[in-house]
Amino acid sequence: RMEELMLGAPPQKQESILMIFSGAHHGGLGSTGSTHHAVSVVKLEERRVELLGLMERFRDQGDCLCNLANSVLFQGKASEAFKYYQRARTIAEAHGFFSVECKSCQGLGRLAMREGRHDEAVQLFQNALAATPLCENDDGDAILQELKVLNMLTDALFMTGSVDEVEPLVERYRAAFKPVGREES
């Protein structure tokens, strides 16, 4: 039924239809409610991802995949989360969506950290960090993304024993919080 409504509707109407069918359920993805409810909400979101692809709204599709990955990870399904993050990253790289690339690399990095693959996590967080200056051109919040990634990268570097690489990151972090027009003492 939703697909029939979507395919014949103008873009503004498609947005409304998506919100009606899936938006109200989105907040419940990571909830600890019934398993049946969580499964049906995930299925609705998977359908939303599919429809966004049909509409060629790839940035929204990538964002939705990252949100879906975060939600199933919250439910303890790391292998499913990996697939969603990886799919989002593929979309981001194919279309140049830096905010989606940053989010998907962060998620993949968090998964690598959880599984003890610290060197891989460092590489993923470095990829995310490289994408952050470009997020502003992609409707992302570059400063917030950069601070989140710096924090995760610092943790990963400590876990690999690369303490000497942490100091420049700490300086970069401090520079982001330095008040404008204030001299250091």
Image (tube, rainbow, N blue to C red):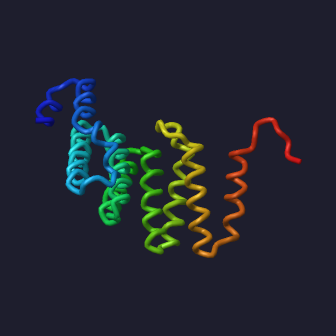
Instruction: Name the residue nearer the viewer: 90 or 80.
Output: 80
Side of 158 where 6 appears, left or right: left
Side of 181 where 131 appears, left or right: left
Side of 104 where 14 appears, left or right: left
Percent position (x, y) of residue 79? 32, 66
Percent position (x, y) of residue 87? 32, 55
Side of 124 where 35 appears, left or right: left
Q: Is residue 27 above or below residue 111?
A: above
Q: Quadrant of residue 171?
A: bottom right
Residue shown at 56% from the left, 55% from the top: 149
Q: Is residue 19 above or below residue 97?
A: above
Residue shown at 42% from the left, 61% from the top: 108
Percent position (x, y) of residue 150? 60, 56
In the rendered image, the residue lying farthest to the right is 185
Percent position (x, y) of residue 178? 75, 44
Residue shown at 34% from the left, 40% from the top: 60
Q: Quadrant of residue 9?
A: top left
Residue shown at 25% from the left, 54% from the top: 34
